[in-house]
Amino acid sequence: MSFKTISIIGLGYIGLPTAAVFASRKKKVIGVDVNQEAVDTINRGQIHIVEPDLDIVVRAAVVGGYLRATTQPEPADAFLIAVPTPFRSDRNGDHEPDLSYIESSSKSIAPVLKKGDLVILESTSPVGTTEQMAGWLAAARPDLTFPQTHGEASDIRVAYCPERVLPGHVVKELLENARVIGGMTRKCSDCAVELYKIFVQGECFVTDARTAEMSKLTENSFRDVNIAFANELSMICDKLGINVWELIKLANRHPRVNILQPGPGVGGHCIAVDPWFIVSAAPEEATLIRAARKVNNSKPFFVLKKIKTAVQKFKSPKIACFGLAFKANIDDLRESPSLGIVREIAAEKLGEIMVVEPFIEALPDVLSAFANVQLVDVETALQEADILVGLVDHSQFREMALSDLKEKIVIDTRGMWK
Ligand code: SAJ
C-alpha cells in the first residue's frame, strides 16, 4: 500500500510533530484541528506550542508545500487521530476517561473515508477505545466494511499506536523510539507498520489493539508508581531526619535497585492522568496504582505544610519559589504541582512571593491575579528572600552558587541544592 496523503487529526504536542516528520519525508500531509488560530499559525510556518527544534521542521514542511493545516477533514490514505483524552472526576473521587474528542474526530473523518484507508488512534486511551472508535466509524459509514465485522476482508483498516515521546525531546524520540502497533487484525497492523516505517527508525512491535492500549497506560503507571515510591520515601525520611537523596544514591548502588527522584508532586498531562484509566477499568484490582496516584497527589500538600511552618519564623516573610514548570528545562506549566503550590501560598497570603522561572516571560493568569506575586530574576530572589523553595530542577538552578544563605530557610523539593 502506498500512502500518498496522510491526515493528522489534532495538531497538538503529538499531532503537529508527527505531521511535520511525515512531511519531512516528502509526504503530502493534511493537518486538521478545530482551533482556527492554531491552523492559521501552522499555515504561516509557525508553531503554537513550545518544543525544541519543532519550529524548524514545521517551517520547512510548510514552506516546502508538504504540510497544510485546515479545520475541515479532507480525503487521505491514512488518518492518525491524536486528540486529548482528559478525565472527569466521578462521585467517588475516581476518574472517568472522557472520549468525546475521539468521538467527534472519528465522526468528522467518517464522511471522507474511502475503501482501502487506514485509521490509526494515537491518543492515550482506555482499553477498548480502538474498537469503540471503529464502531463510531462503522455507524457513520454503513456503505463501508470495518474489521470488527469483516476481519481481514474489511474496506477500512484500524489500529492503535500510542506515542511514547518525552516532552522536550519529541522530535528526536519520534524518530528513534520503538513503537507498539496494535491492529484490529494482522493486516491492519502490517498496514500501520508500513505507515510508521516512513519515518520511524526504531523497531515496530506488533500486537493487538487492546494490548497496545494497555501498554501505553502501563508504561506511564510504572513511572507513576515508581515516583510515588520515591515521594513516599522522601516524606518518611523527613520524619526520620534522613537525607532522602543521599539515601537513594546509596540504595541505587545495589545492582537491582533503581529508585527515581522525589519532587513536589507529579505533573504533566500523561503520568498524572493515565493511571486513572487503569483504575477506572479495574477499580478493585488496581489498588497499588490508585495508591500511587494518591501518594503523588498528596506531595504538594506536604510541601505546603513545610512552607507554612517556615513562614512562622518571620514577621513579613519573603518567599522565593524556584520554578513553575511541571519538570526541568521546559516551559510547560500544564498540571504543574509547582504552579499549584505557588498559587496556594499566594491565595493563603503567606507572604511576599518571588517567582523565578527563566522559561517564561510573564506570570500565568492564575498567578498574575495576586498582588503578592512577582516574577523576578535569580539574583533578586537570592538577595531578598527569607525562604528559598526549590520546585523545579532546571539546570540553571542546579548550577547556582548558593554561598550566603546564613539567615535563609531552604526547602528543596528536588534535592538540587545538596
Ligand atoms: N518526576 C519526578 N521524579 C522522577 C521523574 C519524574 O518527580 O524521578 C516528575 C516530573 O517532575 C514531572 C512528572 O514526574 O512532574 C512527569 O515527568 P516525566 O519526565 O516522568 O514524564 P512526562 O510526563 O514528561 O512524559 C511521560 C513519558 N513516559 C514515561 O517515561 C513512561 C513519555 O515517554 C510519554 O510519552 C509521555 O509521558 C506521554 O505522553 O504519555
Image: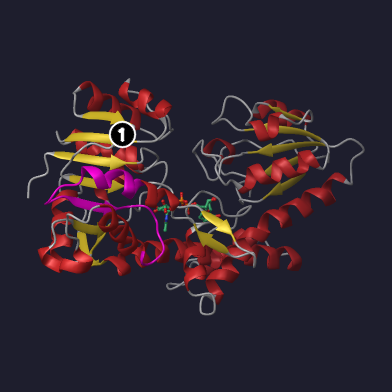
Q: Please identify the quarter of the rendering in which residue 172 is found.
A: top left
Q: Is residue 120 magenta?
A: yes
328 with respect to 302 (left or right): left
**Residue 225, visible in the rendered structure:** yes
Task: Work out which residue is located at the far front of the displayed protein and give it.
Answer: 142
Q: Please identify the quarter of the rendering in which residue 22 is found.
A: top left
**Residue 82, visible in the rendered structure:** no
153 with respect to 389 (left or right): left
Q: Disc 1 designates what residue?
A: 72
Residue 105: percent from left, percent from top:
35, 46
Q: Is residue 160 magenta?
A: no
Residue drawn 57% across the image and 44% down it: 393
Residue drawn 44% across the image and 55% down it: 99
Report helix, strand or loop for mark 1.
Answer: loop
- Compared with 77, 156 (above or below) is below
Give, as a single range, the part of the protein colored magenta. 105-128
64 with respect to 362 (left or right): left
- Compared with 402, 187 (above or below) is below
Residue drawn 56% across the image and 56% down it: 88
Residue 53: percent from left, percent from top:
34, 32
**Label 1 CA crowd tier, 10 Å (few <14, some 14–19, many 20+):** few
Residue 414: percent from left, percent from top:
61, 50
374 with respect to 21 (left or right): right
Comparing 196 with 32, the one in front is: 32
Comparing 353 with 212, the one in front is: 212
